[in-house]
Amino acid sequence: MTYHELEFLKNNIREKLAKCIRDPKLSQKLSENSDQPVEIVERAQIAIERDLYLTLRNRVDDRITELREALDHADNHDFGICLDCGDNIPVKRLMAQPTTKLCVECQAEKERKERFLRDTAEDYEW
Ligand SMILES: [Zn+2]
């Protein structure tokens, strides 16, 4: 990976990070609890919205953590090298998924194994 490719990737990660931090969906205010009597249906709706918001918030927080780690990792000599096979991960893949630590083939193999284990566990009667 050239110096320019690395700088390009780091800027890409910074842009994705900035986008996560200022995600407009997360600036919505949660429905406030109030002392006003509300219908049960409305209360249930508020609870659902709150759960969705918190789930989304957690996912975005996780994504921010991953992107920050990728940005830190970008300065290491092994950035862009597949953890499983040691091959270079193509820059195009790192642009699309800067947090990836596996090349396409190793990622596919990992997912195949996970699917197999999941399917086997589902077939097994406990
Ligand atoms: Zn690999």
Image: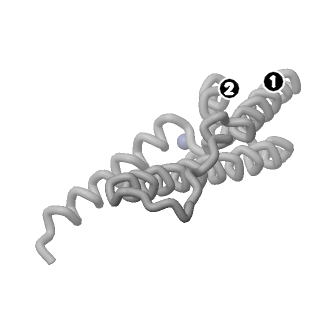
Measured as percent of width and height from the top left, residue 27 is found at: 68, 41
In the drawing, what numbered circle is on residue 8?
1
Lower position in the chain sequence, tag 2 or tag 1:
1
Q: Nearer the viewer, residue 104 or 45?
A: 45
Measured as percent of width and height from the top left, residue 47 is found at: 44, 58
- Compared with 88, 60 (above or below) is below
Q: Which residue is mark 2?
A: 91
Q: Nearer the viewer, residue 68 or 83?
A: 68
Q: Are marks 2 and 1 in contact (CB under 8 Å)?
A: yes
Measured as percent of width and height from the top left, residue 110 is found at: 43, 49
Q: Amino acid at mark 1?
A: Phe
In the drawing, what numbered circle is on residue 66?
none
Q: Residue at x 53, y 50 (%)?
A: 53
Q: Residue at x 56, y 61 (%)?
A: 34
How many numbered marks have been drawn onto this rendered protein structure?
A: 2
Q: How is the image coloured?
A: one colour
Q: Nearer the viewer, mark 2 or mark 1?
A: 1
Which quadrant holds the C terminus? bottom left
Q: Nearer the viewer, residue 91 or 15?
A: 15
Measured as percent of width and height from the top left, residue 37 is found at: 45, 61
Q: Secondary structure at mark 1?
A: helix
- Compared with 108, 126 (above or below) is below
Q: Give the distance between the C-alpha atoms of the residues marked 2 and 1, in whole angstroms.
A: 10 Å
Q: Residue furthest bottom?
A: 126
Task: Residue 114: name its quadrant.
Answer: bottom left
Q: Amino acid at mark 2?
A: Val
Residue 58 is at least partly visible in this image: yes
